[in-house]
Amino acid sequence: MADKRIGITTDCGCDLPDEYLIANDIELVYFYMTTDRGRFRDREEMSSENVIEYFENGGSRIMTEAPPENEYETIFKRRLERYDEIIHISISSGVSNSYKNAVAAREKLGEAKDKVHIVDSMHLSTGLGHIVIKAVEMRSGGSSAEEIINSINAMRKYVSTTFISRSTDYLYRNGRLGKHSHQLCHLLHIHPILTLRDGKIVLKSVEFGNMDMASRRYIRKELRKISSIDKHRLFITHVGCRLKKITEIKEEIAKKGSFDEVIVTKASATISSNCGADTFGLLFVYKY
């Protein structure tokens, strides 16, 4: 068993259920959403449902903002009162300043900085969540901070983080897609499939036509190499999907193979603000 007690912190965009975070004493650092109606803290003041409501009622744009350095510093100091070492696992540095801010906060801790370790997950949502869970499991097994960090750094390239969106509306509203590309996608009924590649959000592919049919094709394609996937756990992470839709997604997954756990989670406001209603993703880990 490791001699030192290890605390784990992460960004709110991990999209893990509250009960899991509480049970494992994982503290979140919260992102902020800025709209024409004010500035709101993710999870605590704004949810994915609020994001949908905002846009459906004439809202124009939501700007996401990483937590400032001082908030990371405060949390690290508080955690060090209970733990000997801290591992903070951040949303990908390719999509947010959160990793950079966490590193800067660590440098302000003086001699205590060597007790805080910052890991760039290179993922978001429950792709990040998978990595956090791995860290928790290794901690429970008595691994040292160094062993945990080496393991999750190696794990990153085997995590699959993808989402299918109903439309490009939210990407366009938030300035992540040009007007002409957005109009073309709308005209052709294109549903974008986004993925994390080398820590950055990129367009993986597209599906055409009816969203229900497009969703089924997306699931089949993502799980086509089912024998290469670790079947211990799969997340269905969604933005405003109804129960009927979630049931259909689960049924389609079951046709491809069975997982020990299929966990349904809601995307945070941070994630939802760039995706839109009826977006969902399959997030899993390949065998390695």
Image (spheres, grey):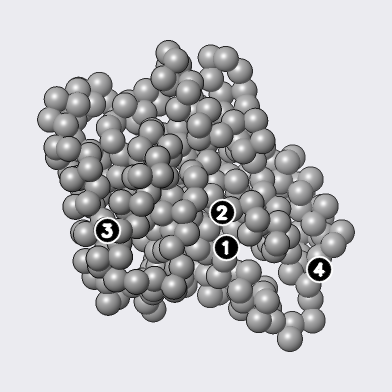
Dot 1 corresponds to which residue?
132
Q: Nearer the viewer, mark 1 or mark 2?
A: 2
Viewed as shown, does residue 236 lie left or right of 105?
left
* Crowding at mark 3 (Cα within 10 Å: few <14, some 14-19, many 20+): some
Please, what is the three-letter code of the amino acid marked with disc 4? Asp
Dots 1, 3 in contact, CB < 8 A: no
Query: Would you say the residues marked 1 and 2 are in contact, meaning their CB atoms lie under 8 Å apart?
Result: yes
Q: Residue at x 41, y 44 (%)?
A: 243
Mark 3, residue position = 252
Mark number displayed over residue 16: 2
Identify residue for label 4: 84
Q: What amino acid does circle 3 point to? A: Glu
Mark 1 or mark 2, earlier in chain:
2
| Of the image marks 1 and 4, the number of the one nearer the N terminus | 4
Which residue appears at 37% of the width and 23% of the height? 173
Q: Residues within 10 Å of mark 4 (few under 14, many from 20)?
A: some
Separation (CA) of disc 3 from disc 4 = 45 Å
Under tag 3, what secondary structure?
helix
Q: Nearer the viewer, mark 4 or mark 2?
A: 2
Within the image, what quadrant is residue 177 found in?
A: top left
> Which tag is nearer the camera, tag 1 or tag 3?
3
Residue 246, image x, y percentages: 37, 49
User: Mark on residue 216?
Assistant: none
User: With respect to residue 137, does 132 lie above or below?
Assistant: above
144 up-or-down from 124: above or below: below
214 left or right of 20 in image: left
Q: Secondary structure at mark 4?
A: loop
